[in-house]
Image (cartoon, coloured by chain):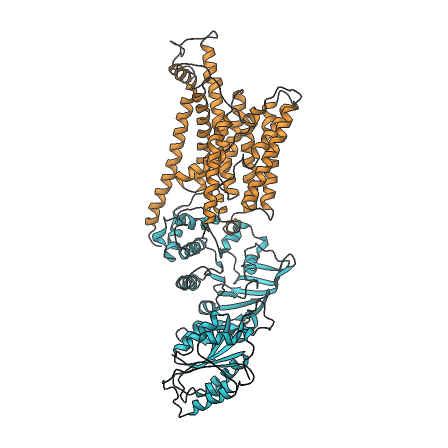
Chain colours: A orange, B cyan
């Protein structure tokens, strides 16, 4: 039978290390969520913000008068509570949910296409989803039920784009480069259609940049709830496919010989990634590069095991978007800029770096 | 575990087509449990297609294929993975993961949904890593180990899959000779000790003959030979299927037959992919006198033959090193009739003869006699002998033969350069 303890110990150690990474990421994210409400478009003393948070979180048990000592506006303490809890925290939670959705979708797509450059934004899923939501808004589909219709139409747009990408990937020209170029072309095309739609919209007052650059503003808790629910379910399902994604990295045939129904798993994963992306972009518009960057960060720290990469990418993506929001408020106090500007500032150079490194590796022969 | 069938793999008139091309044509094959079968055949003969059909990847247009009694197409992907493991020819991992994790991938078909690898799985991986001698590399990255070690890691992955049938597709083609032997020895042990059925596509016929219980030869999608290595390997088979002229020998230690390939079947014969080199040029030599001429000819693109030579002669070593076909006699013995007739065959095929300045004794005098018979038919180039060196140990017979060659039209040359100039097509035929 032999003595497996030698490798058994190493194994345990590496599992411990991976779980440790996830726990650290989760803790950091929790701290981020707790302290992010300190930043906002209105100046509120930090102590008051924290008091309000604890007051609401404890159901009123702690700090019965959270506004004590602060300059209370005309609307009274209730106005401050509304700003901190309903505006800021819902905005923050949306950043977390959307970031997590984009992160885990990016990790999934990179695994499915065996391509470190895949990302819901670069492959056009985000544009497709946003176009779907724009249709709802511009043509005033089902006014009053938009909280349900937005994600639904976003999903239709995203999954249609995903189907095109999948078809391109399956065709005999489905090389990595072809796939990316198809995605980029699709993404540009869909963005153009989106711009056109918004510019000539009957309602006339829509801002193109709101959709194309991503935005966390103007929402409420019910939107958070829908996005949160969909992303949680899709994300949890995606996270169960870590093992299959590990095997798919060996190529479809090898994965199949080891027992993975490669085709079926691929279709499911793209479907789930489209759902998660759609839920994310339905309320925020296009936010680029979160899905590209996040999985790489996890890989660097915790290795290539997708069982860790997927949940890790969700946590890093959430943190990334939250950091983008906070940075935006810290650098330009008083206004919340479209958040996609910040993610693109960080993500585009990173994309170039990956592309450069990849080119280098392939020139070296990849023996 | 997989039914009581005694046949691991059964193909019944299987035909597989890729578009217009027929990759397998009406192949019948039964592989009993526990056998180590080698699939041989030239490139494109259908070896890989047969393996892919057994894995369920290539669907037969006609006929059907059974794994342990069940049609492979009716088995689920997981059930297939439990019955048959695959070691592909060229698996190049993209991501660096620990070798142990890589091996544990083989457990997938045995794990339930969301079930993590348990102690049993890790034990299996440990045993497999020990069996391929990689236990100390378990924590290293799969991309950081050598190609030979990676191939062994993939074999270990196939082992933990615990499938009763293992398919190997040219598993040793990227390995150096030591790793080839090491790898196939392990596969052979696996087959013998654990009763695992092995079907391996192998380029190298000699390795196949040495390790496999049975060799099946495919040619253009058809099964053209089948049986024990000693029954299957023959000079005729190599000439017919591969278009290569070879000597069949027997390894004195293992008793396994092996083929010593020499050159391609004569140009013009309808052999696919025949080499369109020049020659062959036959070099009559001995005592190391011919080696420079053999090398120069080979480098200039000529196919060369040599002989007759005695074993242990350094010219023989040079000739074999260059892949030249030779007629060989045991040391110091006079040329036997068999060797002499082989020499004649070589001379008949030659387009020119080069006579190197070799010392001539009674045992190799027939070389000059046979060369002289070529006069008038093909050009003969006679290398001038250095002055003052004794070379005729036949009491004048050799001198007389060389004189006959000169008078008969043989052209005298002084060195390698003159030889190549004389053979060059533009220089025209030497006087005859």
Report the residue at 46% width, 74% height from top: B417
B99 or B165, nearer to the observer = B99
Q: Quadrant of residue A123?
A: top right
Q: Is residue B290 left or right of residue A5?
A: right
How far across and how far down the image is residue A219, in percent? 53, 20
What residue occupies the far top of the structure in this picture?
Answer: A74
Quadrant location of the N terminus of chain A in the rendered image: bottom left
Q: How many marks?
A: 0
Report the residue at 57% width, 65% height from top: B29
Location of residue B362 with respect to A73 vertically, above or below: below
A153 or A171, nearer to the observer = A171
Report the residue at 43% width, 8% height from top: A72
How far across and how far down the image is residue A234, in percent? 52, 34
How far across and how far down the image is residue A25, in percent? 40, 32
Q: Is residue A193 left or right of residue B102?
A: right
Report the residue at 40% width, 12% height from top: A66
Residue B256 at least partly seen: no
What residue occupies the far bottom of the structure in this picture?
Answer: B395
Q: Quadrant of residue B393?
A: bottom left
Residue A306 at least partly seen: yes
A22 or B241, nearer to the observer = B241
Location of residue A38 with respect to A344 vertically, above or below: above
How far across and how far down the image is residue B264, in percent? 53, 72
Location of residue B363 with respect to A31 vertically, above or below: below
Location of residue A22 with respect to B338 vertically, above or below: above
Q: Is residue B131 left or right of residue A220?
A: left
């Amino acid at each position: 039978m032999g003595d497996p303890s030698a490798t058994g110990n190493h194994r345990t150690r590496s599992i411990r290390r991976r779980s440790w990474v996830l726990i650290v990421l989760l803790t950091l994210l929790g701290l981020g969520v707790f302290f992010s409400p300190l930043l906002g478009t209105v100046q509120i003393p930090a102590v008051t913000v924290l008091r309000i948070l604890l007051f609401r979180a404890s159901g009123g048990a702690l700090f019965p008068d959270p506004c004590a000592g602060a300059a209370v506006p005309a609307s009274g303490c209730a106005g401050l509570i509304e700003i901190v809890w309903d505006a800021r925290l819902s905005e923050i939670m949306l950043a977390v949910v959307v970031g997590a959705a984009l992160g885990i979708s990016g990790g999934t797509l990179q695994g499915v296409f065996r391509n470190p450059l895949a990302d819901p934004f670069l492959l056009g899923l985000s544009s497709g989803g946003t176009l779907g939501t724009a249709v709802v808004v511009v043509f005033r589909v089902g006014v009053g039920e938009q909280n349900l219709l937005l994600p639904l139409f976003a999903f239709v747009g995203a999954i249609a784009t995903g189907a095109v990408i999948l078809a391109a990937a399956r065709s005999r020209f489905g090389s990595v480069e072809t796939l990316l170029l198809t995605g980029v072309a699709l993404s540009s095309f869909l963005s153009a259609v989106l711009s056109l739609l918004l510019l000539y919209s009957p309602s006339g007052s829509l801002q193109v940049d709101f959709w194309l650059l991503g935005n966390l503003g103007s929402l409420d808790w019910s939107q958070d709830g829908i996005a949160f629910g969909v992303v949680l379910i899709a994300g949890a399902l995606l996270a169960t496919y870590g093992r299959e994604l590990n095997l798919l990295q060996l190529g479809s045939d090898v994965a199949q010989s080891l027992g993975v129904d490669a085709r079926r798993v691929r279709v499911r994963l793209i479907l789930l990634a489209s759902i998660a992306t759609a839920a994310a972009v339905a309320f925020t518009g296009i936010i680029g590069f979160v899905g590209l960057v996040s999985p790489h960060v996890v890989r660097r720290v915790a290795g290539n095991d997708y069982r860790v990469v997927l949940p890790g990418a969700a946590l890093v993506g959430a943190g990334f978007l939250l950091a983008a929001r906070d940075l935006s408020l810290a650098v330009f106090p008083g206004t919340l800029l479209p958040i996609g500007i910040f993610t693109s500032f960080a993500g585009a150079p990173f994309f170039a770096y990956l592309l450069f490194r990849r080119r280098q590796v392939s020139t070296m022969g990849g023996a | 575990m997989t039914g009581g069938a005694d046949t691991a793999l059964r193909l019944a008139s299987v035909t597989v087509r890729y578009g217009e091309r027929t990759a397998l044509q009406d192949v019948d094959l039964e592989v009993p449990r526990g056998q180590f079968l080698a699939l041989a055949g030239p490139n494109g003969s259908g070896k890989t297609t047969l393996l892919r059909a057994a894995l369920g990847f290539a669907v037969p247009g006609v006929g059907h294929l059974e794994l342990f009694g069940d049609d492979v197409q009716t088995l689920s992907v997981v059930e297939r993975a439990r019955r048959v493991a695959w070691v592909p020819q060229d698996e190049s991992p993209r991501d660096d993961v620990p070798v142990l994790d890589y091996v544990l991938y083989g457990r997938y078909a045995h794990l339930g949904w969301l079930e993590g690898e348990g102690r049993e799985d890790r034990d299996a991986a440990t045993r497999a890593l020990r069996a391929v001698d990689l236990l100390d590399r378990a924590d290293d990255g799969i991309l950081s180990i050598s190609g030979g070690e990676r191939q062994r890691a993939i074999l270990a992955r196939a082992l933990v899959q615990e499938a009763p049938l293992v398919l190997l597709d040219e598993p040793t083609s990227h390995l150096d000779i030591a790793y080839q032997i090491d790898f196939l020895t392990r596969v052979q042990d696996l087959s013998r000790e654990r009763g695992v059925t092995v079907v391996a596509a192998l380029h190298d016929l000699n390795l196949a003959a040495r390790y496999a219980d049975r060799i099946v030869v495919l040619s253009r999608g058809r099964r053209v030979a089948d049986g024990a290595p000693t029954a299957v390997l023959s000079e005729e088979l190599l000439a017919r299927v591969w278009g290569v002229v070879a000597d069949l020998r027997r390894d004195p230690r293992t008793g396994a037959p092996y083929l010593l390939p020499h050159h391609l079947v004569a140009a013009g014969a309808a052999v696919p992919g025949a080499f369109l080199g020049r020659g062959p040029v036959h070099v009559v030599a001995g005592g190391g006198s011919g080696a420079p001429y053999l090398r120069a000819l080979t480098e200039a693109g000529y196919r060369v033959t040599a002989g007759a030579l005695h074993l242990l002669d350094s010219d023989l070593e040079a000739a074999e090193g260059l892949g030249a076909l030779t007629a060989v006699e045991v040391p110091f013995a006079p040329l036997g009739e068999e060797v002499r007739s082989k020499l004649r065959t070589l001379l008949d095929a030659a387009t020119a003869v080069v006579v190197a300045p070799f010392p001539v004794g009674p045992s190799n005098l027939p070389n000059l006699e046979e060369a002289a018979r070529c006069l008038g038919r093909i050009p003969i180039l006679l290398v001038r002998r250095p002055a003052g060196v004794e070379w005729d140990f036949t009491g004048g017979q050799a001198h007389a033969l060389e004189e006959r060659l000169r008078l008969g039209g043989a052209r005298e040359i002084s060195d390698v350069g003159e030889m190549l100039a004389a053979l060059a097509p533009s220089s025209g035929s030497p006087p005859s």
